[in-house]
Amino acid sequence: CIYAVSRYYQWLSPGEKFPMLEVSGLVDEGSFIPSLVRYRDYYRPPMPPMPMASFDANPLICFTHDTVRFNNLSTPTEPLPQYEWVINPSTFSFIDGTNNQSIEPVVVFEQQGAYDISLIVTNEAGSDTLERLAYINVSSDVSIEGSDAFDGIVARVYPNPVLDVCNIDAGFFISMIEIYDLDGKLCMRQEYQLPKDQIVLDFSVFKDGIYLLRLYQAGQNTAVTLKLKKG
């Protein structure tokens, strides 16, 4: 008479108190028939969460040859993901030893215009892309004298620096004025139903600092930028 014999096997892993694999069953006529298989898989490093791309930059409105620094807010950061920055148009340069795969690149824009910025973040779990259209707005470099040319017409703001009230002499009809600080924050927007070429602005409520005035020409999708110092 041949009797079945029970068998129990276990596989251990260094540093683990409990078996990683357990198998039990019967040996019947020389064949092992498993009846229970217990497997632990949580000893493996967990898969990181899906990446979420996020970023900001400072400043958002600048002049040609100004330095713009990108702040990477993507998650998770461990294990270190792969980053790829895409900037259009391509009239810019990475500086300070950074490149398009740096965590937080530093960029100088060489021509005026609106630049689209994309960040692609990739890890073991997948990939995510954040695209910000017309995110960085670059104007031609102007001095603190506060003048800029448009089709040969020189727009200017004075006095500069200003204490309370400043005057804008555009040389063309203005439909809207936007005032930004150097962080790219919109401080004021004023629209004119009847466009004007000469405007008086009250700057008494503004804090001391440097501001960018965007003058939009009536009936055109164009603007000039003036740099104005308060205080």
Image (spheres, rainbow, N blue to C red):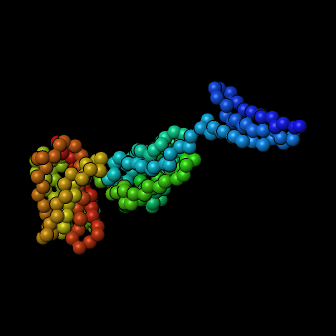
Q: Position of residue 53 (x, y in %)?
A: 45, 50
Q: Residue at x 11, y 58 (%)?
A: 200
Give left or right: position of 145 versus 12: left
Q: Quadrant of residue 32?
A: top right
Q: Position of residue 161 (x, y in %)?
A: 18, 46
User: In the orientation shown, which residue stands out farthest toward the right?
Assistant: 1
113 or 43: nearer the viewer: 43
Q: Is residue 146 visible to the viewer in this orientation of the structure?
A: no
Q: Quadrant of residue 152?
A: bottom left
68 or 171: nearer the viewer: 68
Q: Residue at x 19, y 58 (%)?
A: 189
User: In the orientation shown, which residue stands out farthest toward the front?
Assistant: 1
In the displayed structure, would residue 200 be above or below residue 123?
below
16 or 129: nearer the viewer: 16
State the count of labels. Answer: 0
Q: Position of residue 120 (x, y in %)?
A: 50, 53
